[in-house]
Amino acid sequence: MDKAFLADIQGRLDTIEPGADVLHPLMDALREGLRAERAVAYGIELAPDHYAASFCHGSGFAQSQSELMGILNGFLNQQPNPWGYFDPARPAAPQRNRALHFRPHAETEAPAPLHDTGSAAWRRLGISATEQAQVRERVHEGVTTLYRQLRMEHMFQLRTLVCEDSAMLAWIGALRSEPFTPREQRLLQELVPSLHRRLELETRLREAGLLGTALEAALEALGQPAYVVSSKGRVAYANSAGRAQLEQVAPSLVEAVRRHAQGEALPSGTSVTLLQVRGLCPHYLVVDRSVEAQTGAKVHMLATRWGLTGREAEVLEHIIQGTSNKVIAARLGCAERTVEVHVTHVLNKADAESRSALIAKFFQAS
């Protein structure tokens, strides 16, 4: 029975589509397998001046998922750092990725917070003897209202802080009126590696999305054709300037990556930088700076073709370099609103819908 439970949870963690809400569908199975009355999982975002819940899933609660989220956020927004037996910003090492068994909150005046009493219980939380009274008072003041609101102040807790190094990925646990047995504690502990692996994957996917957006913005700002090329020769990304001539330069990109990998001299005007991301084969940032010297002449040619004024031609050159309106205004000694007007005129005269479309049109023009 225990093997079937573990296999079921681990199988779901491995098969639920990446990027999907992986913990929500596990709550009912986790509650039943641990013979608990309730199960809950939540994550915490650390804002500069407060906490916020990134997610909250529960099973066996009278409240709906949205109500649980609202209650948790209402609690977190009022809490100092930290508020309980662990610091969400940096949980103590003894608590990371370990299944721990806690007394009911109503019994916090007991000698120790864990079900097994004595000074060893505090050491298992990474809390020193000098901190114990302060921590107990903080827990009592901070958590009483929340636990009473959820009617769990008389429940034992079995929980784990799933962490990646010192960062907490999720609080996952179960609650019931009777103490948990070594069996349930062992089962939760055996699930921790699978939970950790999957939550770490989800974190990496979210980071990839964030970093992808940042990389795109950075490459657009270069104002030069730029590409991300895999070690296998696939162009994974090209900025607007790069897309304009990708078909013609693709073979030379692969050659540049090959030369760089073998330590050979690169073609004049080309730079190659290794991008190493954990879990991916090597990728390379290739920037073609050979067109930089040609930009001035091309700006003059296209300014004449598109009927731009002298000031609009200056603005066009800055746009091609990826310069923001604020910086253009400072360089030209005029108001930012004036630059916005010039940019609009340039886009209209070039028949381009956006700055990126204008950059692509600029590099495509012969």
Image (cartoon, grey):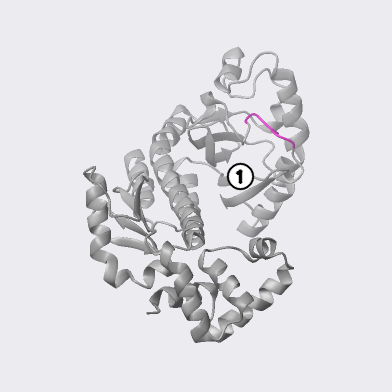
Residue at the disc numbered 1:
44
Judge whether residue 233 can be spotted in this image. no
Q: Is residue 357 above or below residue 204?
A: below
Of residue 60 and residue 244, the one placed in the foreground of this image is 244
Residue 348 lies in the magenta-colored region: no
Q: Is residue 355 above or below residue 261?
A: below
Quadrant for the C terminus in the image: bottom left
Image coords of residue 321 (percent x, y): 52, 64
Assess disc 1: are there few (<14), some (14-19) or many (≥20) residues with their C-alpha within 10 Å of its C-alpha. Answer: many
Q: Is residue 353 above or below residue 264?
A: below
Give the magenta range. 80-86
Please give left or right for residue 19 compared with residue 92 in the image.
Answer: left
Image coords of residue 166 (percent x, y): 52, 32
Q: Residue at x 41, y 35 (%)?
A: 187
Image coords of residue 158 (percent x, y): 54, 34
Q: Which quadrant holds residue 229?
A: bottom left
Quadrant for the N terminus in the image: top left
Of residue 338 and residue 279, the one placed in the foreground of this image is 338
Judge whether residue 288 can be spotted in this image. yes
Q: Residue at x 42, y 30 (%)?
A: 186
Secondary structure category for the residue under label 1: strand
Q: Which quadrant holds residue 108?
A: top right
Image coords of residue 317 (percent x, y): 54, 69
Tell me which amino acid carries mark 1: Ile
